[in-house]
Image (cartoon, rainbow, N blue to C red):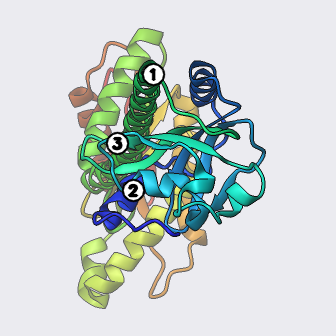
Amino acid sequence: MDAPKPLNEAQRLEALRTYAILDTPAEQAYDDIVKLASLVCDVPIALISLIDEDRQWLKAKVGVGVLQTPRGDAFCAHAIANPGELMQVHDASLDPRFADNPLVTGDPKIRFYAGAPLVTASGVAMGTVCVIDQVPRTLEPRMVEALEALSRQVVALLELRHAHLKLELLAAEQQERQIQLEGYQKQLEGLNQILVEQNTIDALTGLKNRRAFDRILSEELSRSGRAGASLALIFIDVDHFKAFNDEFGHIAGDGALQQIALMLQSQARPYDHAARYGGEEFVLILPDTGIDASMVVAERIRQAMQYVHWQHRPMTVSIGVTSTTAADGSLSLVGRADRALYAAKRKGRNCVVYLGEDS
């Protein structure tokens, strides 16, 4: 005779799923409980049985080899119908519910059964701790108390398992949030880098802008002062650029400035710093560079203008060069390079003029 399903069957199954215990490997704590149940009740068979939707699954067992049975054959399916008390079947062969049960008529030839329901805090029974014998009998009161105590211990183990699963879930969620936060941090760093570049890069030419130039020059002056090294500065001005704009338009002028910027980058050494100082003026900071080397670089830039493919007409540049040691500050260095540039213009343009520290 199949056991009637509890009125709270849906809630019961949901609770069972929550513990995530079904089909898990054997565990010593549960195995110890069925061994104790077998010893205390002096029976050959003891089980921790969980009643799923259509099967009985055994979390731990002593005296049987099967891992599960159909729910319709399970004595425990009857026991969970009354969660408030331990169920005893003194002689299954005489009980109309079980007389023709295949577990009675065949192996393991059940005659006696006692099951203490595993009842959760919400009052649902997920299964039992049960003991089985192949002869009729009745449990002594002390055995009943022991079996009920063991059922409470199984529920306590399940609650610990549930708490552990929740902690693992929280830890996984925390890790996921940490990964997300790290992702957001990288995005912010990327955005900050973009903002930094927008604040330090000239939008038209892609060179450093005036703000970046001022900072880099100050840093390089400090470094050269500490190291006792020389530092050179080259000012470059496009000759007759206003006339070029007036004749060919500002779009053509912007294109010409972009070509000059590319030329400067190609002529600069990896550790030099090229910047657009403003309008048609460019500047090049040359660390660890003295008079002779800076003049070579400046002349190379002036001559490179001849090899640029100009769309409208050839262009030239006037160049002012200076160098310094630790004694100079950025203002005096920039001022001297600027004076050198204007000297090159007065000299007739398309030339290089050097002014030293005594100029």
Callout 1: helix, strand or loop? helix
Q: Position of residue 86 (x, y in %)?
A: 39, 39
Residue 165, disc = none
Q: Nearer the viewer, residue 98 or 162?
A: 98
**Would you place residue 192 above or below residue 72 in this image?**
above
Name the residue at 29% across, 28% down. Answer: 218
Q: Which residue is mark 3?
A: 119
Q: Which residue is mark 1?
A: 146
Q: Residues within 10 Å of mark 3 (few under 14, many from 20)?
A: many
Of the residues shown, which amino acid type is indicated by label 1?
Ala
**Would you place residue 343 above or below residue 133 in this image?**
below
Distance of label 2 from label 3 (alpha carbons): 75 Å
Callout 3: helix, strand or loop? strand
**Horizontal relation, residue 109 to residue 332: left or right:** right
Q: Which residue is mark 2?
A: 207
One can see residue 225 in this view = yes
Name the residue at 50% across, 51% down. Answer: 76
Name the residue at 43% across, 32% down. Answer: 151
In the rendered view of the protein, which quadrant contains the C terminus? top left
Q: Nearer the N terminus, badge 1 or badge 3?
A: 3
Q: Name the front one of labels 2 and 1.
A: 1
